């Protein structure tokens, strides 16, 4: 098990991981992702974030397979945090999150959490920072985390 910077050759695995879990963004079952959200999950969109110095992108590997991914837009917006379903509940998301916090000089992080992931972020110490938002069948909870610097 290891955490490392994501690189371009990781894009197919990262994209597959995120797309496999993207249904958790949706309010109801059987719905499809709106095009504005799908556009952020393309191979090209992941490559763009990996090459953008404003993003920190890390992967979590188990036996050479990518099972977790975190992306933070600097200075402190948590853009993506995903762990493969079969590896959830094993502390991988917390490991990725703690790694980001250690590397960051940021005093505050924000996230637009899927409703499904709110309990995870609360365990990390995030607090709800506004009302639930919704757009095209996708709901999200704005949340913030203040570092103890």
Image: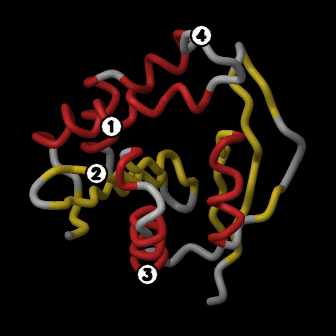
The answer to whether residue 35 is left or right of residue 1 is right
Nearer the camera: disc 2 or disc 4: 4
Q: Are marks 3 and 4 in contact (CB under 8 Å)?
A: no
Alpha-carbon span between mark 1 and mark 3 = 24 Å
In the rendered image, which quarter contains the C terminus? bottom right
Q: Position of residue 129 (x, y in %)?
A: 84, 55
| Residue 104 circle label | none
| Residue 67 circle label | 2
Secondary structure of the residue carrying numbered label 3? helix
Q: Which residue is mark 4?
A: 30
The residue that appears at 73% across and 61% down in the rendered structure is 144
From this view, report whether residue 68 is shown above or below residue 131: below
Q: Residue furthest front?
A: 86
Sequence-wise first label, 4 or 1:
1
Q: Position of residue 50 (x, y in %)?
A: 27, 44
From this view, report whether residue 137 is shown above or below residue 56: above
Sequence-wise first label, 2 or 1:
1
| Residue 17 circle label | 1
Alpha-carbon span between mark 3 and mark 4 = 39 Å
Sequence-wise first label, 3 or 4:
4
The residue that appears at 39% across and 35% down in the rendered structure is 18
Alpha-carbon span between mark 2 and mark 4 = 25 Å
Q: Residues within 10 Å of mark 4 (few under 14, many from 20)?
A: few
- Count of numbered circles on the image: 4
Q: Are marks 2 and 1 in contact (CB under 8 Å)?
A: yes
Q: Are marks 3 and 2 in contact (CB under 8 Å)?
A: no
């Amino acid at each position: 098990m290891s955490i490392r910077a994501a690189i371009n050759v990781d894009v197919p695995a990262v994209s597959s991981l995120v797309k496999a879990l993207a249904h958790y963004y949706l309010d109801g079952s059987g719905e499809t992702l709106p095009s504005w959200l799908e556009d952020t999950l393309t191979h090209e969109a992941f490559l763009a974030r990996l090459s953008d110095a404003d993003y920190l992108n890390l992967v979590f590997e188990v036996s050479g397979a990518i099972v977790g991914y975190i992306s933070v837009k600097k200075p402190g917006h948590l853009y993506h945090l995903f762990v493969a379903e079969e590896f959830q509940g094993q502390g991988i998301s917390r490991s990725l999150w703690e790694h980001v916090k250690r590397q960051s000089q940021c005093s505050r992080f924000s996230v637009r959490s899927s409703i499904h992931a709110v309990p995870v972020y609360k365990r990390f110490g995030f607090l709800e920072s506004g009302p639930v938002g919704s757009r095209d069948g996708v709901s999200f909870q704005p949340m913030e985390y203040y570092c103890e610097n």
